[in-house]
Image: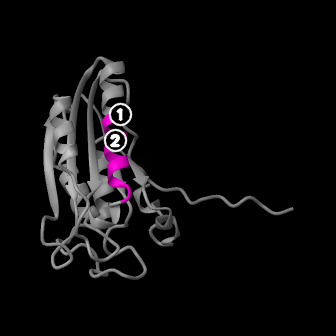
Amino acid sequence: MAEKMKAPSVDRPELAKHDSAILDLAFAMDCTGSMGSYIKTAQQNIREIVETIVASEKSNVHLALVEYRDHPPQDATFVTRTHDFTSSVSQMKTWLDACSAQGGGDCPEAVADALHDVSKLSWREEATKICVLVSDAPPHGLSQSGDSFPEGCPAGLDPIDITRKLAEKGITLYTVGCEPAILSLGTFSWHWLT
């Protein structure tokens, strides 16, 4: 009879508590060209999530959005564009509606930069803190091929270190992988976020 394999123990920060009537909800969205077939659906789903939460929770909800693309020369428009927390659903919808899928270049994108910007948002101490990362590509330095920055983020940001810091701040990070092929990237496979 085969023995069950046991995963090694990993030290992880305590999970955020979700019992507060105060919610800070941030979205980090990949706005590169490869998201072209997904971005409208992502925008619509985010709108619905925001409307549902605000309508059902009747609580103090603040919303933020971090758009990201890639580093030059892969993209010349922007690396990240940050919209800090607002209580205005209409402001969030305006930011969301302005998002477009363009640029990029290689497969990995500026995920580390986006998560870094997420960590710098004005999170309220007493709030339940949630970030949803919407992407179809891994961060630089973690994929096996097709990476113009195979040594990692050109700004020196480590996505694994940043996700740990988010957890230490009590920010729960959820990921939405838009491209089924992302799961076959081996070393990436979204496991770096856990």
* Residue type indicated by callout 2: Gln
Question: Which image quadrant for residue 56?
Answer: top left
Q: Identify the element where label 2 is drawn.
A: helix
Q: Nearest the camera: 184 or 17?
A: 184
Q: Height in image: 28 above or below 79?
A: above
**What's the residue at 20%, 41% (across, down)?**
64
Q: Residue 5's quadrant in the figure?
A: bottom right
What residue is shown with label 2?
44
Instruction: Say above or below: 50 vs 83.
Output: above
Of the 4 image quadrants, the one containing the N terminus is bottom right
Does 38 lie within the magenta span? yes
Q: Which residues are magenta?
A: 37-48
x then y, percent, for residue 137? 37, 66
Instruction: Specify the amino acid type for callout 1.
Output: Glu
Q: Quadrant of residue 90?
A: top left
Residue sitting at 31 percent across and 45 percent down?
43
110 or 171: which is nearer to us?
110
Q: Is residue 73 magenta?
A: no
* Viewport quadrant of the C terminus: bottom left
Which percent across, then down, holds residue 18?
A: 38, 29
Q: Main secondary structure of the magenta part?
A: helix
Q: Residue at x 28, y 45 (%)?
A: 27
User: Label 1 near label 2: C-beta < 8 Å?
Assistant: yes
User: Badge 2 local density, few (<14 within 10 Å), some, or many (20+)?
Assistant: some
Residue 26 pos. (x, y %): 26, 42
Q: Which mark is residue 48?
A: 1
Question: Relative to 131, is 53 above or below?
Answer: above
